[in-house]
Image (spheres, rainbow, N blue to C red):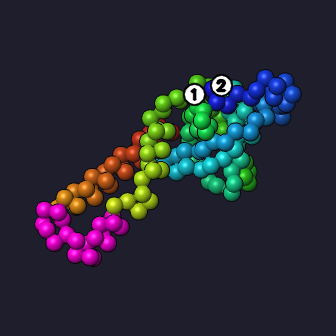
Amino acid sequence: MNGLRASPDQQAAEPFSDSRRRTRSRVIKSAKILFAGSVIDCVVQDVSVGGAKVRTPTPVAVPEKVVLQVLGGAAFSATRRWSRGLQIGFDFEDVTPLDGHAGVQAATALDALPSKGLARAMEVLERAGFFDDPDLHEAARQAEAAYSRFETALRSRVHAKSS
């Protein structure tokens, strides 16, 4: 699997199975769990053709459907099967990576947006009397509304593509 495959040496030296349908190979790969505009850093600890086990820095609640994106590698649509402490087990929806996946790209764009949006900046400028010109005030109002629509559309795309 692109971006997640254990090296041939790792596969030969470390395959294991513990009552799973598929044999897993131990790996250490940085990754991100993406869902609804959230990004959680994690480390992939083991992987099979059909899924992966990851470890997060702190216990986190993740929804059933997510995108698991390996840093510098592929992304996979995944279903959470279990969660215990810092570890989460995922089944891949498809063994084919989601290269160029729109949900992954939307999540990345959403993550790059300022956390407070334009609303806070507009409040500061309005309190300072910056919008004394009615045309400037209307343009700012329209920009804030457009920003809000853009953010909502990105969140919708992330949710639709990772579910």
Residue 130 lies, in percent from the top left, at 22, 71
Q: Quadrant of residue 77?
A: top right
User: Which of the two residues, 134 or 26, is positioned nearer the viewer here?
Assistant: 134
In-image side of 58 versus 93 (left or right): right
Amino acid at pointer 2: Met
Residue topped by disc 1: 97
Q: Which residue is mark 2?
A: 1
Which residue appears at 19% of the width and 69% of the height? Answer: 131
* Residue at position x 52%, y 46% in the image: 35
- From this view, report whether residue 45 is shown above or below residue 37: above
Query: Percent x, y for residue 17?
Result: 83, 31
Q: Are marks 2 and 1 in contact (CB under 8 Å)?
A: yes
- Residue 28 placement (x, y as % from top left): 74, 39
Secondary element type, mark 1: loop
Q: Nearer the viewer, residue 83 or 153?
A: 153
Marks 2 and 1, how far apart at CA: 7 Å
Q: Is residue 123 magenta?
A: yes
Whole-percent x and y of residue 111?
Answer: 47, 50
State left or right for residue 20 relative to residue 118.
Answer: right
Q: In the displayed structure, would residue 131 be above or below residue 152?
A: below
48 is higher (above) or lower (below) than 57 = above
Which of 160 and 44 lies nearest the eye of the viewer? 44
What amino acid type is highlighted by mark number 1?
A: Pro
